[in-house]
């Protein structure tokens, strides 16, 4: 019930804000990465801090409207620093769609949940600066794609000592018109 109410509010907000709430509508893509995953070390494109490997988690990629799996995401964390029970990280995300792969990177933060969900421990998010491009590269339909990526979500870090995270994160990907969304 809560999930459906949240999804309804989000869809209404996205509609008002001019972002279509579909997996692929116009130049906007709205997806959810959701599920439990155990981290593994993988190579990533070099970060601003010179990091070439990330702690990466493979998670199902879902259509926001239908909650049906439409691919997988590889969520990689690097350049982590902690503060007041929360942390900041460079989040490199590989979205594996049937039409191609889209790779984004942004700085994200996670803070402990003070009240609310007994299932999640941290609220997480990353907001692009106006005009920034968070897309590193794409393949297939997303070749030459550029655009803004926003992350809003929650994670359960209670088993992070075993390098496990439960994700429930929404990504809004706004591709620049005419590039990578043909």
Image (cartoon, rainbow, N blue to C red):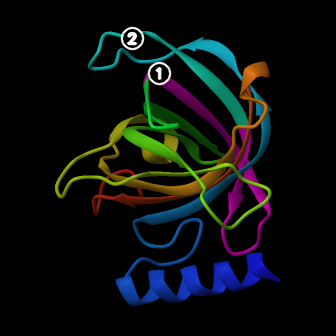
The quadrant holding residue 8 is bottom right
**Left or right of 16 in this view: 76:** right
Q: Secondary structure at mark 1?
A: strand
Is the C terminus in the top left, top right, bottom left or bottom right quadrant?
A: bottom left
**Left or right of 112 in this view: 51:** left
Q: Residue at x 48, y 78 (%)?
A: 20
Q: Residue 126 appears at what percent x and percent y?
A: 40, 50
Q: Residue at x 39, y 66 (%)?
A: 27
Marks 2/1 in contact by CB < 8 Å: the verdict is yes
Toward the viewer: 158 or 129? 158
The quadrant holding residue 58 is top right
Residue 51: numbered disc? 2
**Left or right of 160 in this view: 130:** left
Residue denoted by label 1: 78
- Residue 130 appears in the figure: yes
Q: Is residue 73 magenta?
A: yes
């Amino acid at each position: 019930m809560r999930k459906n109410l949240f999804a309804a509010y989000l869809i209404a907000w996205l509609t008002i804000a001019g972002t279509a709430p579909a997996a692929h509508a116009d130049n906007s893509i709205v997806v959810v990465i959701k599920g439990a995953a155990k981290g593994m070390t993988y190579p990533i494109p070099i970060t601003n801090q010179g990091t070439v490997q990330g702690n990466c988690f493979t998670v199902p990629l879902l259509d926001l409207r239908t909650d049906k799996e439409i691919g997988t995401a590889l969520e990689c964390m690097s350049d982590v620093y902690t503060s007041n029970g929360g942390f900041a990280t460079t989040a490199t995300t590989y979205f594996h769609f049937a039409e191609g792969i889209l790779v984004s990177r942004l700085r994200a933060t996670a803070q402990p949940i003070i009240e609310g969900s007994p299932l999640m421990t941290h609220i997480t998010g990353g907001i692009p600066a106006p005009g920034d491009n968070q897309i590193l590269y794409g393949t297939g339909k997303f070749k030459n794609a550029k655009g803004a990526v926003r992350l809003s979500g929650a994670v359960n870090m209670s088993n992070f000592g075993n390098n496990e995270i439960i994700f429930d994160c929404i990504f809004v990907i706004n591709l620049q018109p005419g590039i990578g969304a043909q």
